[in-house]
Image (cartoon, coloured by chain):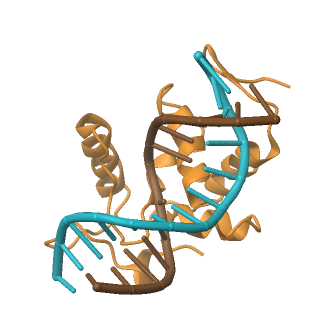
Chain colours: A orange, B brown, C cyan
Amino acid sequence: MIVEFGIVKMPDNNFFRSVYSIVKKIPRGKVTSYGRIAALLGHPRSARVVGYALNALAKESESEIPWQRVINSKGKITFKGDLVRASLQKALLLEEGIYFDSEDCVDWKKQGWP
DNA sequence: ATCGTGACGAACG
DNA sequence: CCGTTCGCCACGA
């Protein structure tokens, strides 16, 4: 099956789709990490793959899935060369009421999910 | 099938 | 509290 995210062909991969279904459940005003999602899926060591899945998503600026609510385990947004996406992510999160401290770090205890 | 790659993360030093 | 190293695993060439 091909999940249509624009022209990008998504593989018939349960892991990717599982990632998306989890991300969709993150409530507004909350955030979680790549590793957390991987753990929820029963693949505690597949954090990188979660990032890989979200990467394919962001290209199409998919509105249905709140990709911006996924950050790294340190509680920060990961740049990795794409400053545009990073700033967009922060803007979206600020709009949702996420609070960043002086070091651009979120408070897991108050805004972490689950 | 093999291999390099990466929105990660934990373990070191 | 840094920066490095290493394990991880789906994907695409």
Establish if A50 lies above or below A47: above
Establish if A96 lies above or below A2: below
Quadrant of the rendered image containing residue A88: top left
Establish if A12 lies above or below B11: above
The quadrant the C terminus of chain A occupies is: bottom right
Residue at 79% across, 23% down: A2
Residue at 67% across, 47% down: A20
x and y, in percent, of residue C5 in the image: 39, 66
User: In screen coordinates, is A73 left or right of A10?
Assistant: left
Quadrant of the rendered image containing residue B13: bottom left
**Is residue A53 among what the camera can see?**
yes
Establish if A80 lies above or below C7: above
Q: Nearer the viewer, residue A71 or C5?
A: C5
x and y, in percent, of residue A46 in the image: 64, 59
Q: What is the number of callouts on the image?
A: 0
Residue farthest right in this picture: A1
The quadrant the N terminus of chain A occupies is: top right
Residue at 76% across, 48% down: A15
**Is residue A30 among what the camera can see?**
no
Residue at 55% across, 73% down: A113
Residue farthest top in this picture: A7
Quadrant of the rendered image containing residue A109: bottom left
x and y, in percent, of residue A43 in the image: 72, 65
